Image (cartoon, rainbow, N blue to C red):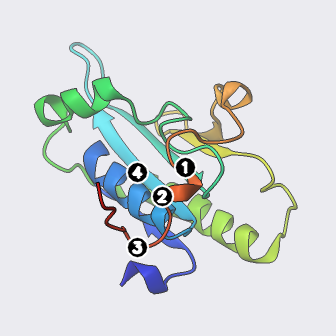
Amino acid sequence: MLQGCDVAFGSIDGYKGRDELEKTCRRFLIPLIDLGMDVRTLEGHRPRMAGQVILSIPCEACMWCMGFLDDEKMALEDQRYGDAGDNPQVIWALGHLASSAVGLFVDLLTDWTGSLRERVHLVYRGNEGTISPCRRLPYVPRECPHYPLDQIGEPRLRAV
């Protein structure tokens, strides 16, 4: 079903699901707009909301390149997801993220700002009410080594 899409939106709880969706989108050359958030509580402090909106375009930097996905997060995911409770839903925070994702989608289709020539990883700080580019972006590689072009399309069996 995903193969028929021109653009995919992802809002999956967890890193492993995001990784699988990005792999599939990359395989079929589908831009992916990922958004998500979590609520964390540190002992003695109020809960903190944080989230992201990431544009993953085939042949450009992926979520691994941007440092959003990494081996440590994947390994720890099952142990600590959502320490403010299972699947916290904070509607005003998700509204900010969804609006930013829709803005990226419109820009992707219309080139409204002419700015999508660069990588996009927006960071949401819910307690401050801010959305800003990730500070790591200038250091993110332009080309992605994680998803080579020879792995696009339907999986193929090779004789060995």
Position of residue 113 measured from the top left corner of the image (x, y, whole percent): 86, 62
Tell me the CA gap for discs 1 and 2. 6 Å
Q: Are marks 1 and 2 in contact (CB under 8 Å)?
A: yes
Q: Amino acid at mark 3?
A: Glu
Q: Earlier in the sequence, mark 2 or mark 4?
A: 4
Q: Which residue is mark 1?
A: 148
Work out whether 46 lies above or below 57.
above
Viewer can see residue 83:
no
The image quadrant that residue 78 belongs to is top left
- Disc 1 vs disc 4: which is toward the camera? 1
Direction top: furthest residue: 44
Q: Are marks 1 and 4 in contact (CB under 8 Å)?
A: no
Mark 4, residues whose alpha carbon is within 10 Å: few (<14), some, or many (≥20)? many
Q: Which mark is residue 36?
A: 4
The image quadrant that residue 99 belongs to is bottom right
Q: Which residue is mark 3?
A: 154
Q: Earlier in the sequence, mark 1 or mark 4?
A: 4
Work out whether 121 lies above or below 151.
above
Looking at the rendered structure, the secondary structure element under dot 4 is strand
Q: Is residue 25 left or right of residue 21?
A: right
Position of residue 137 measured from the top left corner of the image (x, y, whole percent): 68, 32
Q: Amino acid at mark 1?
A: Pro
Work out whether 84 lies above or below 154.
above
Residue at the image position 50 percent from the left and 82 percent from the top = 5
Tell me the CA gap for discs 1 and 3. 14 Å
